Every structure is written in structure tokens, then in C-alpha cells.
Amino acid sequence: MPSTVIRHFAHDPATRQLTVTFTTGRIYVYEDVPDAVAAGLRAAGSKGSFFNSQIRNVYPCRELPPRVG
């Protein structure tokens, strides 16, 4: 199901990093995200609600600089 908040996300099981691109264009990397949480986001009917309750303010994150061009 498409999200009105999250444009794209990808999880790297080796590093446990979850990269989330929001519809605003801002990109954040969340650290130490377990496979089960990433799978939950993938399966969630509402990606935004799942993200807000299970990821946001739970895992440390950093914003990536905006892409140029």
C-alpha cells in the first residue's frame, strides 16, 4: 500500500540500517533496526502509523544531506 508520508525505505540486514525517504525528500538512516521491525514496516497497512509507533523516537537516526541534481 502506498504511503502519504514515506516514499521509499530499504533495510540492510548486515548493518541493521533502515534508510527512509519521506515524501518531503528528506532521507534518514535509522540504526540498529532489527529484521523483524523492517518486515513489520513492509507488511504494515499504514506505513506512517507503523513508523511513528515502532521506529520514530525508538532508534537513533541521522539525516543524510540533500541530494544535489
Image (cartoon, rainbow, N blue to C red):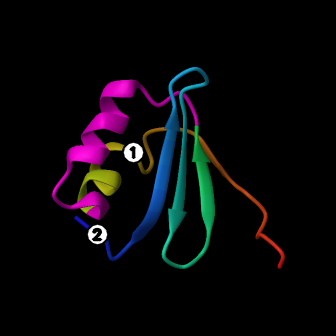
Q: Residue 67 in the image: state x and y as whole percent.
A: 78, 70
Evaluate if marks 2 and 1 touch, with contact meaning CB atoms under 8 Å apart.
Answer: no
Query: Which disc number belongs to residue 2?
Result: 2
Magenta range is: 31-48
Helix or strand or loop: what does disc 1 sit on?
A: loop
Q: Residues within 10 Å of mark 1 (few under 14, many from 20)?
A: some
Q: Assess whether residue 42 is covered by the magenta stretch.
A: yes
The structure residue drawn at horizontal position 54% and vertical position 79%, both measured from the top left corner, is 24
Counting residues from the start of the chain, the first of labels 2 and 1 encountered is: 2
Relative horizontal placement of residue 69, taking residue 11 as reference (left or right): right
Q: Assess whether residue 43 is covered by the magenta stretch.
A: yes
Classify residue 46 by image quadrant.
Answer: bottom left
Q: Residue 30 in the image: state x and y as whole percent.
A: 56, 42
Q: Which amino acid, by three-letter code, is at mark 1?
A: Ile
**Above/below status of 39 relative to 50:** above
The structure residue drawn at horizontal position 31% and vertical position 70%, both measured from the top left corner, is 3
Q: Which residue is mark 1?
A: 55
Relative horizontal placement of residue 20, taking residue 29 as reference (left or right): left
Q: CA distance from mark 2 to mark 1?
A: 18 Å
